[in-house]
Amino acid sequence: MSVFDVLKRRRAVRSYEPREIEDGLIARLLEAATLAPNDRLREPWHFYVVRGEAKRRYEQMASEYLQERFPTKPHLVKESLAVLETTPLMIVVTADMIPGDEASSEDNEYAAACAIHSMWLAAQELGLGLVWRTRGVGLVRDERLQRFIGSPENRKIIGTVFVGYPAAETPATARTPFAEKTTWL
C-alpha cells in the first residue's frame, strides 16, 4: 500500500471491539511514534501506556472531570464515559518543555504531534483503530491527568490516544481539495 493510500484511509476510530491489544502491537505503535521527525533529534516525547487497573483509575478521573465540566449535560457525560469504557488502550503523549527556550519547546510540541500521527498511520497497518483526543475524555487540559501520569513539570501533555480493534468500518469524511487551501507564490 502506498503512503497516499494509507493517508487516504486513515480514520478517527471511536468504537472498538472488547478485546485487549497485544504487547507486541503496542510496541510497534510506540516504535512508529519514535520514527517521527523532530528538531535537532531531541526526541522530545514520552509515552504513558494506560490499561488494566490504571485505565479504571483514568475512567474514575474522567468521570469526575466530566461531571464537573458538564453538570447540566448528563447525556454527554454518559456517552463520553461509554466510549472510554469500551476503549481497551490509551496512550498519553507528552512533549519536553525547555525552560527559557519557548521556540524549542514549541518545536517539541510539533514533534510529539508528528509522533501521534506516525502511530495513527501504523495503527492502520496493524489492524487497529485510533483517535487522538485532547478535550473531554482526553483530559489534556486538566491538571489531574498530569498528576495521574506522574509527569514532571517540564512535560506538556499533547494528547491522549485511544486505541483498539475497530468494531466497524469508519466511513471517509469529505476533505476540502488542496487547491482551495493553497496559495502559489
Image (cartoon, rainbow, N blue to C red):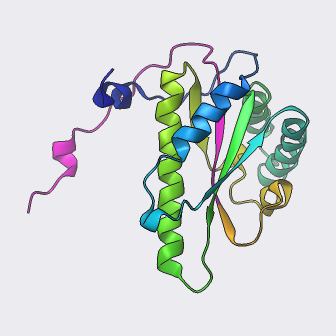
Location of residue 166 by image quarter? top right
Q: Is residue 150 above or below residue 100?
A: above
**Residue drawn at point x = 78 percent, y = 60 percent:** 146
The foreground one among 113 and 46 is 46
The boundaries of the magenta stretch are 157-185
Q: Is residue 17 above or below residue 46?
A: above
- In the rendered image, residue 75, in percent from the top left (x then y), is placed at 76, 33
Location of residue 96 by image quarter? bottom right
**Residue drawn at point x = 47 percent, y = 63 percent:** 41
The foreground one among 128 and 136 is 128
**Residue drawn at point x = 51 percent, y = 35 percent:** 120
Q: Is residue 87 above or below residue 105?
A: above
Q: Is residue 88 left or right of residue 110?
A: right
Assign the N terminus to one quadrant of the image.
Answer: top left
Assign the C terminus to one quadrant of the image.
Answer: bottom left
149 in magenta: no
